[in-house]
């Protein structure tokens, strides 16, 4: 009987060990993200910290084959906190938000279209390269430097925004654009940390102009 009890205990131990492996992996992943959040708390104490910020430098719209397109030039400067997260393997998600409105007298402007282009930036430690994915189209490119990756993200070329046939030729339309770091896509512990730190609150001011100018 003692031998049977020992065999049952051995089988139970193996079963418990196999059940614990997924939990252990999850715990390790959570611990790494939590450790990163703790390290980021110390960054504001460092001298010459980089604040970061986004800026829309210039924009243009043009009509071609019955479709309005937008081009834009943006500057993306990451804060120390965002850089530390990126270099630690955290993917950063950027949103390019575009709004088209029709001007109305004595009332708020009417929203005609609301477009979002989403990009994901990730550092691949093994190759030492930066990967930029367009989450709308699924396309991606790799870059040797962070500067090249951010510069490419900042050049918006010939992005279609609306078919001219949907617009009233006698109305006045305005376009505005801004860039935002999406905090909601950060890992759990880091997302909680970002709520209290300005280093992840990166967004540009709205940049507006009249359609067709």
Image (cartoon, helix red, strand yellow):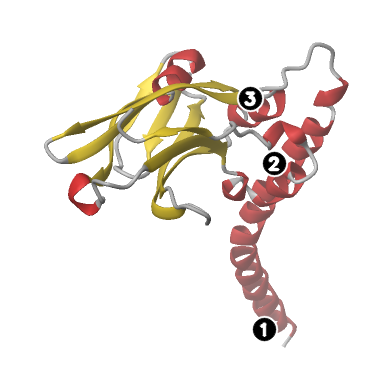
Does any portion of residue 92 appear in the rendered image?
A: no
Where residue 153 sits, quadrant-wise, is top left
**Is residue 66 shown to the viewer in this render?**
yes
**In the rendered view, would you say 1 is above or below 93?**
below
The residue sitting at 46% across, 37% down in the picture is 176
Q: Which residue is mark 3?
A: 53
Distance in Å between CA atoms under marks 1 and 3: 67 Å
Element carrying mark 2: helix
Residue lying at the far left in this picture: please name it: 65
Q: Given this view, does label 1 or label 3 mark the residue nearer the observer?
A: 3
Q: At x 21% / y 45%, what residue is drawn?
A: 164
Q: Which of labels 1 and 2 is toward the front?
A: 2
Location of mark 2 (residue): 32
In the picture of the structure, the residue carrying the numbered disc 1 is: 4
Q: Earlier in the sequence, mark 1 or mark 3?
A: 1
Residue at 84%, 12% in the rendered image: 47
């Amino acid at each position: 009987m003692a031998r049977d009890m020992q065999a049952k205990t051995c089988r139970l131990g193996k079963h418990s060990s196999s059940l614990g492996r997924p939990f252990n992996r999850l715990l390790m992943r959570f611990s790494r993200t939590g450790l990163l959040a703790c390290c980021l708390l110390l960054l504001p104490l460092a001298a010459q910290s980089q604040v970061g910020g986004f800026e829309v430098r210039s924009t243009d719209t043009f009509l071609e084959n019955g479709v309005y397109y937008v081009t834009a030039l943006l500057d993306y400067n990451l804060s120390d906190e965002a850089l530390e997260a990126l270099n630690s393997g955290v993917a950063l998600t950027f949103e390019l938000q575009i709004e088209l409105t029709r001007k109305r007298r004595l009332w708020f402007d009417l929203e005609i279209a609301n477009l979002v282009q989403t990009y994901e930036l990730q550092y691949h430690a093994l190759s030492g390269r930066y990967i930029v994915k367009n989450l709308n189209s699924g396309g991606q490119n790799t870059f040797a430097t962070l500067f090249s990756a951010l510069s490419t993200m900042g050049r918006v070329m010939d992005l279609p925004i609306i078919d001219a046939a949907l617009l009233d030729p006698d109305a006045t339309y305005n376009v505005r654009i801004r860039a935002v770091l999406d905090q909601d896509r950060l890992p759990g512990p880091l997302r909680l940390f970002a709520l209290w730190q300005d280093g992840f609150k990166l967004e540009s001011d709205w940049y507006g102009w009249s359609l067709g100018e």
